[in-house]
Image (cartoon, grey):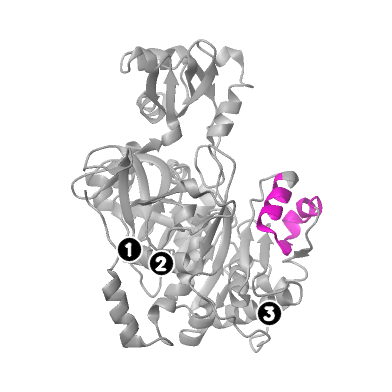
Amino acid sequence: MVRCRSPSRPVWESIRQRWGPMRDPLNWPTQDLVTHRADTTPDRTAMVAAASGNAVTYRKLDAAVDAVAAELDRRVDAPDATVATLLPTRPAVGTLLFAAMRLGATLAPLNVELDAATLQSQLSTVDADLLVCGDSTASLAADIDGCPTVSVDRELSAAAVADETAAAGSADETATDVTPAPLSRTDTQLVIFTSGTTSEPKGVRLTVGNLVASAVASSYRLGVLPDDRWLVCLPTYHMGGLAPFIRSALYGTAAVVQRSFDADATQQVLAEHGVTGVSLVPTMLSRLLDAGWEPPASLRFVLLGGGPASETLIERCRERDVPVYPTYGMTETASQIATARPETAFEHAGTVGQPLVFTDVTVVADGAACDPGERGEIVVDGPTVTPGYLNGDDDAFSDHGFRTSDIGYRDADGHLWVEGRVDDQIVTGGENVDASTVADTIREHPAVEDAAVVGLPDEEWGQRVAALVVGDVSPTAVRDHCAERLAPYEVPKTVRIADALPRTASGTVDRAAVRSHFGTASESNESA
């Protein structure tokens, strides 16, 4: 068994003794990250609006954070308040995050793609004291009852200091209305709802310590340079979109914010703004490559997560000299768990690399740790792991740490492979079928672009294997292809063709939506 262990307790104790209780480095940060950053490198660029090029320094951002925190403080009982946001990707999200941190409040970003009833339920779950919307989400916010609402474009306009339409003097650099609240690493800073691809979304608590530990561990794997610029084009109501704000403030680098991904526009942003790093999901990267993208010389890394990257996509990256870093992470671990450098990704097809520093990854089967090469559930422990869900789901934790519900294995060198979900297992006629194995087989067909496999209720078989397939291919061709390569019970009894797989905002296949598709798709697309 290969594991990446955290420093031992005696090491931490010696550090505490050397620093003393008031300067204990394990209690850092003691205030919000922008306060620390503005004290050290105030004139470095903090955020850039991709469309306009409007940029702000950490000095300017600090003043905007102060102004927003002061306005929030007049509306909520801080600290210990919860501020929910209903905002698409924009620089103002970063300002609000640090304003909440300055107050000692918790931020709960909500998915703007959800309906009002679901959002109202989530607001109740987090017990929000205030909902922050914008002009683009004001009508949706108006449909939600029971929570005071303010607009980032009206009452909290200082938050838009780096947005495309912000005026140059929209924040008073001399504002000192708020004394930064003292922070503890155990304070809950974020509540983020999971994508809910196979179950109801859960509210994940992430502490100050979780966020900082994740940023530090990421820096060891990706590296940090003084002129780094991290492009944010993922939704900022998920961890993948929020993490660059936190990391940039910690590192003293800049976040370039693009309101939405577009293959052509994003190519231009990457080139014109000197972007050195970007977080993408596989679909985004595929679209960039399909559009003829050649990475600019400034680009150091493409952090590729949110779902499995096919071997074909990784090979295309090798051919185009794309510095791709396939990564495996989740909301419950504040982002990255394991990340492969390009040389590892190219040499070991399909791996997500080795765990990040401080992160323990154990593969577990029947309650015991697996040997290298043995498949089991991936379990994660370390300082990035959430202290728990809002609903107190204790079943997610075991003696080895947080149970991810992902299936995989590690080799003798500690490289991790993620092969599917625990609930991907389909039992049909008494036989066990691994959905990811069937989906991988379908994707090998030259006319297939993508595929998702699920189990559907069946009176005769208990469950039947069903495949939703994207590509210029017939259901019969898919079944014939599978019949030549899989056991008879693994061959999908139901195949339907779609224009695209349903995905969550973070890029993960929405398995619940895949199952729903079989109830509405045309019967002409079915082979049974």
The image quarter in which residue 197 lies: top right
Q: Which residue is mark 2?
A: 213
- The reply to whether the C-beta atoms of the residues labelled 1 and 2 are less than 8 Å apart is yes
79 is within the stretch colored magenta? no
Q: Is residue 208 above or below residue 510?
A: below
Q: Nearer the viewer, mark 3 or mark 1?
A: 1
Q: Residue at x 57, y 48 (%)?
A: 202
Could you tell me residue 78's position as x and y percent? 68, 75
Q: Which residue is mark 3?
A: 67
The residue closer to the viewer here, 229 or 344, is 344
- The reply to whether the C-beta atoms of the residues labelled 2 and 3 are less than 8 Å apart is no
The image quarter in which residue 485 lies: top left
Could you tell me residue 376's position as x and y percent? 32, 38
Q: Which residue is mark 1?
A: 358
Badge 2 amino acid: Ala
Which element type, helix, strand or loop, lies under badge 3?
Answer: helix
Q: Residue at x 70, y 45 (%)?
A: 118
Give the magenta-colored segment's residue range.
118-144
Q: Earlier in the sequence, mark 2 or mark 3?
A: 3
Q: Earlier in the sequence, mark 3 or mark 1?
A: 3
- Badge 1 local density, few (<14 within 10 Å), some, or many (20+)? some
Which element type, helix, strand or loop, lies under badge 2?
Answer: helix
Badge 1 amino acid: Phe
139 is within the stretch colored magenta? yes
Q: Report how far apart the C-alphas of labels 2 and 3 lie in the structure.
A: 28 Å
Could you tell me residue 200's position as x and y percent? 59, 41
Badge 3 amino acid: Ala
